[in-house]
Image: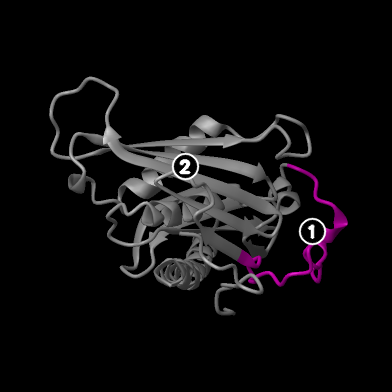
Amino acid sequence: MAGKPTTAPATYSPSPTTRSKKKPPIFTDTDWIRPDGRGFQQCRPAFLRTGAVNAASGSAYAEFGNTKVIVSVFGPRESKKAMMYSDIGRLNCNVSYTTFATPVRGQGPDCKEFSSMLHKALEGAIIVDTFPKTTVDVFALVLESGGGDLPVVISCASIALADAGIMMYDLVASVSVSCLGKNLVIDPISEEESYQDGSLMITCLPSRNEVTQLTVSGEWSTPKIHEAMELCLDACSKLGKIMRSCLKEAASASAS
C-alpha cells in the first residue's frame, strides 16, 4: 500500500496577488523576511505518503516543513456504543501530541478542541450512509509541532481515509493564513503564530470548490479576510492535486 516517496517534497503555494503581544523587529519592519526564508505567499514543501501503519485499515504520513503528522484509520467496524439502528455511520476523531512534539515538553495545543475541529472538517466529505451502524475511527498523532498543525492533520487524515477505502465526496485540504501587521503570511510556522494579530483557516473540497470549515480568530478587516480566503482557497486547490498524486502513486505501486 505504501507509495514510493518522491525525490523532493512538492509545493503548493497560491498564485501571487496584489499588538496584544509585542513583536520582534523582524515582524514590524516593512521588508522583513520570514524566519525560514519563504515568501509571504509561499507554502512549506509538502511530503505525503500512505501506508505508514500496517495494522490500520488506512494510514498516512505528512511532513510540512518541521510539522510531522501520522494518521491511522480503523474501520468501518461495529460500534462499541449501544445505539439504535442508524442508516448512517459514525465518525470518531482523536488528535494527540507526543510528549516531545513541542519545545516545552508536554505542552501542546488543546487536543480536545483539535479533535472536534478535525471531526467537523471531515464529516462533510465522508459518505456516511455507505457504512450504516458502524464506526470509523481516525487517530492523528503530531510527532513534531512546527506550526500550522491542524491544517496538516486535516489534510493527512483525508489521505488516510482514502487509503482505508472510505467513500468520500472529495479529498479534504486545509490551509491557514496568519495576519502579522499589514502582511498576510500563508502556512505559518510556530514563531509566526506566536506573534500573529489574527489567524484564518479554511478547509475545503478542492474538486468541488466547497468549504467544509472556516475558522477566524483575532482582528481582521473585511478586505483582509477576503484576501486571506482567496489565498487559502488557491493553496487548497494546489494541495489537493498533490494529495491526489500521492494516492495515485500508492495505487500504482500496489498494482505493480
Check if residue 43 falls in the magenta segment.
yes
Q: Kindly identify the residue that appears in the image at 80 percent across and 61 percent down.
A: 35
Tell me which amino acid carries mark 1.
Answer: Phe
User: In the drawing, what numbered circle is on residue 221?
Assistant: none
- In the picture of the structure, the residue carrying the numbered disc 2 is 55
Q: Specify whether residue 217 is in view.
A: no
Q: Nearer the viewer, residue 203 or 171?
A: 171
Check if residue 54 falls in the magenta segment.
no
Q: Secondary structure at mark 2?
A: loop
Q: Position of residue 85 (x, y in %)?
A: 13, 29
Residue 15 in which image quadrant = bottom right
- In the picture of the structure, the residue carrying the numbered disc 1 is 27
State the separation of the CA atoms marked 1 and 2: 45 Å
Q: Residues within 10 Å of mark 2 (few under 14, many from 20)?
A: few
Tell me which amino acid carries mark 2.
Answer: Ala
* 209 sits to left or right of 153: left
Q: Is residue 117 above or below residue 161?
A: above
Q: Kindly identify the residue that appears in the image at 81 percent across and 67 percent down.
A: 32
Front position among marks 1 and 2: 2
Main secondary structure found in the magenta portion:
loop
Image quarter where the N terminus lies is bottom left
Q: Is residue 230 above or below residue 131?
A: below
Q: Earlier in the sequence, mark 1 or mark 2?
A: 1
The magenta segment is 21-46
* 179 sits to left or right of 74: right
